[in-house]
Amino acid sequence: MLPLTIQQERTRILEEMARIDHLIRGTVSSQSFQVKRGHQTITHGPYFLLQRHENGQNNCQRVGADEREAIVAGVQAYHRFQKLAQRYAELTEQMTWDQQTPDFKKKFRRFWRPSSRKRPSL
């Protein structure tokens, strides 16, 4: 298989982003707590929380067991979308630098040279 050109990879990323129909911003974490009653320690949980930062505040909401699977899938889709958007921005910037004149590139050398030759896998 031939390697994709930058434009082809950008198109593929946009198509993959368009296929993401549902997403939820935030993270899902689990927590449990222990209560001591007499000589016995009782563990409650795990409880699952959806956490996200909105309007300068950290908002948390407990997620029920029946909702957990859908919430986790939505959060994973959001993180996938973010990775794709980051890769798209990298490719677009690379394309922009590739189109510049050698003198222009020389002046801004430390900005356009990739810090790593590895391509992140998506």
Image (cartoon, helix red, strand yellow):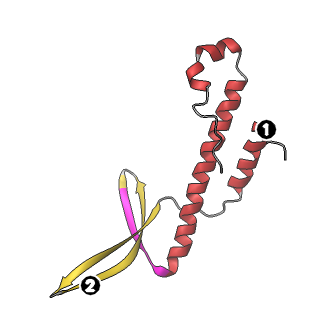
The furthest residue to the top: 103
Q: Nearer the viewer, residue 18 or 40?
A: 40
Q: Is residue 58 left or right of residue 75?
A: left
User: Which quadrant would residue 69 be assigned to in this image?
Assistant: bottom right
Characterize the local packing of mark 1: few (<14), some (14-19) or many (20 or more) Cα atoms within 10 angstroms: few
Three-letter code for the amino acid on which mark 2 is drawn = Ile
Single out the residue that lies furthest toward the left. 38
Q: Residue at x 75, y 37 (%)?
A: 6
- Residue 42, labelled with which disc? 2
Mark 1: which secondary structure?
Answer: loop
Seen in the picture, residue 45 relative to 99 is either above or below; the reply is below
Q: Which residues are magenta?
A: 58-65
Q: Which residue is mark 1?
A: 5
**In the displayed structure image, the side of residue 102 where residue 109 appears, left or right:** left
Q: Residue at x 36, y 79 (%)?
A: 45
Question: Residue 90 at x, y = what percent?
Answer: 63, 37
